[in-house]
Amino acid sequence: MDVEVGEPSRVGRISAVSEDGLRLWIELVDGSSATVDSDGEIFAFSVGDVVLLREDDDYFEAAPASVWPHRDENGPIARWAGVVKLRREDVTVVDGGGRWHLLPTNTEVQYEAGNTVEASTADGVIRVLDPKPLRWVERSDLDDDIIDEFLLKPSDTLSFNDFGGLPAVVQRARELTELPLERHDKLTKIGADPIKGVLFTGPPGTGKTMLARIIASEARATFYAISGPTIFSKWYGESEEILRRIFTHAAEHSPAIIFFDEIDSVAGQRTEDAHEASKRVVAQLLTLMDGMSAAQQVTIIAATNRPQDIDVALRRPGRFDWQIEFPLPTVDDREAILRVKGRALATRDPLPYAWVAAQTEGWSAAELAAIWKEAALLSAADDRDAIMTEDFLGGHDRVTSQRRQLATDQQRGAS
């Protein structure tokens, strides 16, 4: 037989016997454990029997119960605290801090599911420590107003006219998000499967977040904005609970759009190196999306510039089925963006939109918008109340310098 025993103890008690009677699990007085395998003969031992072990010569025999140490407050027997999950006539299941123990039911102690108890492997439940369950990891109590942190009020002024360029992207996004919300009843009568999730991908600053907000505003939909830093909590299980509440609130206040900004930071690949909290959030998101019914007028939009980092399970059918790529704007798109972004500003003289658009190959919408911010600063610095051509061109020069400096810093970091 093979004997594994933790030194220095030799005395043990049978804690479990295999169904075929050929293996014994033994609790030792120092809290360690041992297993004994038979060479073919069924063991004639029962749970609770005291035995004597000697590892060096495979010595194993029954021992008098008197050699088992007396169980008192200072005794060496291994005891631990846990929460009773299930009690039956013969066995009791106790959660010992994330590990479930199957113990013999001790009829001499009055306890029930939910009690916090002291237990040992051989004796089962020894006494009740508290009638309430012990929380292994403390967590905060979520306030009912937690939803307000993610809920954005629809804008009365934001419209598709405020999104410059990329007309094909805008049209496709409206088909996949706005139309299903506005024509939900028609699609239901047709029998079409609901569009649950749409993934916006593309470089930073290409307008993914802005278009999502415009769609919500035009569809008069309740809009929730979620990002990694806002959803993750230091409290165990709280991030998953926040997600669950957002989805529930959205179903009750439809039509609704739940928007995940930089979803790769919220639902990244579940690898062995991934943080446990991130894995739980991904699992909860999958569960919530799978639980969405066709009757709910809720659409999930997610944006990322790193789609390869998203957990692959989110790309399977019934989740983020649809993807819309936001490319860097063309020269015509850039001119349209410059005109749209400057529409609300005071300007003088015809401004060289076409010239600046031609000089900004590879620029994002956010970088083009920055030209107007710099132009406004230059205009105010010269005590003018409107942006002139020299301010507009000066803004372009400033942003160009900033892009060059950023590129230099990135090259240094890479090296």
Image: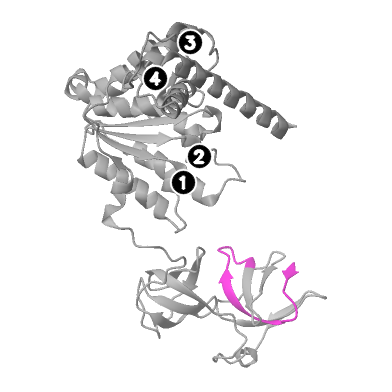
Identify the mark at residue 132; answer none if there is no mark: none
Total number of numbered discs in the rendering: 4
Query: Mark 2 Cα within 10 Å, few/some/many (few <14, many 20+)?
Result: some
- Using the rendered view, name the quadrant where residue 259 is placed: top left
What amino acid is labelled 1 in the image? Pro
Q: CA distance from mark 4 to mark 3?
A: 18 Å
Sequence order check, earlier mark of 1 and 4:
1
Q: CA distance from mark 1 to mark 4?
A: 37 Å
The residue located at (52%, 64%) in the rendering is 99
What amino acid is labelled 4 in the image? Ile
What amino acid is labelled 2 in the image? Ser
Residue 105 in the image: state x and y as whole percent: 43, 76
Q: CA distance from mark 3 to mark 1?
A: 35 Å
Sequence order check, earlier mark of 4 and 2:
2
Looking at the rendering, the stretch of residues picked out in magenta corresponds to: 1-23
Q: Height in image: 165 above or below 47?
A: above
Q: CA distance from mark 4 to mark 2?
A: 39 Å
